[in-house]
Image (cartoon, grey):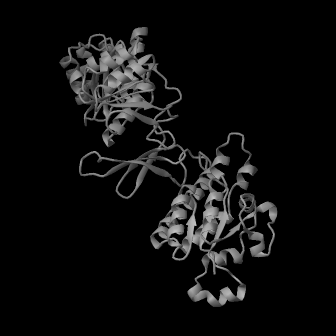
């Protein structure tokens, strides 16, 4: 008996050529309505599913393959089902070539009507795929047109698909239907979940490996980068030159571009070990870089440099003066690329469009031992900046404190940032004591030759005691921004008033752990 192949495909790419090669290898072809017409137009002899089942398509095409003559042919085990096969006239199918209605494409259309999307929920296709995959010891199942050439060659060479091939195809098939069902579930549940909550009751995250990485945070750890199947790519980053991006490079580059993108004008952020060390805005990309670098030249060594603007040749020459791991920007001029590529190993990265939140299509995820934490992105539609001190800040102080507050969002808690005239002067974070962060930030400023007189201070969390403010005021800061909310707020405000420091409360904190 000649082997039979069943075709039922929505994506008809390469289907005719694949079917022709099977026919040339001595296979009989069976196909559902639209696919059968395609194969006949290609000059191939094909038996239609309706002829196999003895039943016409019905319900507007909703029912055509859901029949024992099809599913029995996919699921049968001739060595033990011979009596049933003979009684019901079932002819086994050795290969199922199936892909599904384009549900994801339909659901993603802005103008799609609900009824139209519902009709793209495939029923018969997943059933056939699962039946063939379950019976992979005897049946091959193909869901990806990119596999056609290799499978046709194997059949032309050996006459059949090998055991390892069938098992590999079955794994791919079950993954295909699982992803399809998750997409349907996500669409039905909606972006805010059936309950209306921002985070859904069930969190299904479909991630596709983009690349294996050399190693993780340390050489003994394995690592890879994954991205949502709906938006493949390493966070929208494109490597234009230099060595491959490492695990730590990618983490720091993502934080760097977030920080730079959150700022106005021409902005540059230099990140080292997951926290900013120098950030500045200015009238040009080159000036912004030079001011960011001057904010902490020592820490900038081996860092990641991010811009929120195009990098021109002058900026590239300035950047080339330091050792950096990565430079990232929305765009690079041709001259800038030529200059930066002279550095050989320097990774030159072009960033894609900014995502709507910190993690784009994903909620913020943190893996625990046996569980996962999830949260929405750290964005607030409108933060209040309420003056709580007797003295109101000047316009210049407001600009400085707003800049410092933005940068503080990207510093590890407890974060303290000193800034003046669109430039960070000292950054302290990742400490168990906020006072310690304030002292470290002041020490870094002094070490880099900056005085803090007339500067602004931002604290990502409330000041629990007056000592942190007093230490900063002693250094010369004149304005402070913090969330407020401490039981000692009155004491802290009184300390600010006693020293003539203007203080603003935001009512919002920005911890980053």
Give percent across and percent down for residue 384: 49, 23
Give percent across and percent down for residue 7: 66, 64
**Residue at screen point 67% across, 80% down:** 91
Give percent across and percent down for residue 128: 63, 68
**Lateral position of residue 293 relative to residue 173, left or right:** left
Task: Say whether residue 142 is visible.
Answer: yes
**Lateral position of residue 170 relative to residue 456, left or right:** right
Residue 465 vs residue 68, the one in the foreground: 68
**Lateral position of residue 326 relative to residue 98, left or right:** left
Task: Say whether residue 502 is visible.
Answer: no
**Lateral position of residue 490 relative to residue 26, left or right:** left
Residue 325 vs residue 265, the one in the foreground: 325
Residue 489 vs residue 77, the one in the foreground: 77
Above or below, 167 relative to 80: above
Q: Looking at this rendering, what residue extends furthest in the bottom direction? A: 83
Residue 456 vs residue 171, the one in the foreground: 171
**Residue at screen point 31% across, 32% down:** 275
Q: If the image is split into quadrants, where does the N terminus sit? A: bottom right
Q: Looking at this rendering, what residue extends furthest in the left direction? A: 447
Above or below, 337 relative to 2: above
**Residue at screen point 48% across, 69% down:** 167
């Amino acid at each position: 008996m000649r082997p039979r192949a069943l075709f039922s495909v929505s994506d008809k790419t390469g289907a005719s050529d694949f079917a022709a090669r099977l026919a040339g290898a001595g296979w009989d072809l069976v196909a559902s309505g639209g696919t059968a017409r395609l194969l006949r137009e290609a000059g191939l002899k094909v038996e239609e599913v309706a002829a196999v089942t003895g039943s016409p398509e019905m319900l507007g095409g909703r029912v055509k393959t859901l029949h024992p003559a099809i599913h029995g042919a996919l699921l049968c085990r001739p060595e033990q089902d011979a009596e049933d096969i003979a009684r019901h006239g079932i002819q086994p199918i050795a290969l199922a070539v199936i892909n599904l209605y384009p549900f994801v494409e339909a659901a993603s259309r802005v103008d799609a009507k609900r009824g139209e999307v519902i009709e793209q929920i495939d029923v018969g296709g997943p059933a056939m795929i699962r039946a063939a995959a379950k019976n992979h010891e005897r049946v091959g199942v193909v869901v990806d047109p990119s596999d056609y050439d290799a499978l046709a060659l194997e059949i032309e060479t050996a006459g059949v698909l090998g055991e390892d091939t069938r098992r590999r195809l079955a794994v791919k098939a079950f993954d295909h239907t699982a992803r399809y069902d998750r997409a349907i579930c996500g669409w039905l549940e909606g972006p805010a979940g059936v309950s209306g909550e921002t985070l859904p009751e069930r969190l299904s995250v479909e991630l596709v490996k983009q690349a294996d990485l050399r190693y993780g945070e340390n050489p003994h750890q394995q690592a890879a980068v994954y991205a949502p199947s709906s938006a493949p790519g390493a966070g929208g980053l494109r490597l234009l030159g230099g060595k491959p991006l490492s695990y730590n490079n990618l983490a720091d580059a993502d934080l760097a571009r977030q920080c730079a993108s959150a700022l106005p004008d021409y902005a540059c952020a230099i990140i080292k070990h997951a926290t900013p060390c120098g950030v500045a805005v200015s009238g040009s990309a080159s000036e912004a870089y030079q001011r960011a670098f001057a904010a902490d030249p020592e820490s900038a060594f081996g860092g990641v440099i991010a811009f929120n603007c195009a990098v021109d040749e002058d900026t590239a020459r300035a950047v080339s003066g330091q050792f950096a791991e990565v430079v990232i920007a929305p765009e690079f001029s041709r001259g800038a690329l030529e200059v930066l590529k002279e550095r050989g190993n320097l990774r030159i990265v072009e960033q894609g469009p900014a995502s709507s939140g910190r993690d784009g299509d994903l909620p913020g995820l943190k893996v625990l031992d046996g569980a996962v934490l999830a949260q929405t992105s750290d964005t607030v539609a409108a933060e209040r900046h309420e003056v709580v001190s007797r003295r109101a800040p000047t316009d210049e102080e407001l600009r400085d404190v707003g800049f410092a507050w933005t940068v503080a969002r990207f510093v590890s808690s407890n974060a303290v940032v000193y800034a003046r005239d669109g430039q960070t002067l000292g950054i302290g974070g990742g400490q168990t004591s906020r006072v310690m962060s304030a002292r470290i930030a002041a020490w870094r400023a002094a070490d880099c030759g900056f005085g803090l007189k007339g500067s602004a201070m931002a604290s990502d969390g409330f000041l629990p005691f007056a000592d942190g403010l007093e230490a900063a005021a002693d250094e010369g800061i004149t304005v402070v921004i913090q969330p407020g909310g401490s039981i000692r707020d009155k004491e802290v405000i009184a300390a600010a008033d006693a020293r003539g420091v203007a203080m603003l409360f935001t009512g919002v904190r920005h911890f980053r752990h």
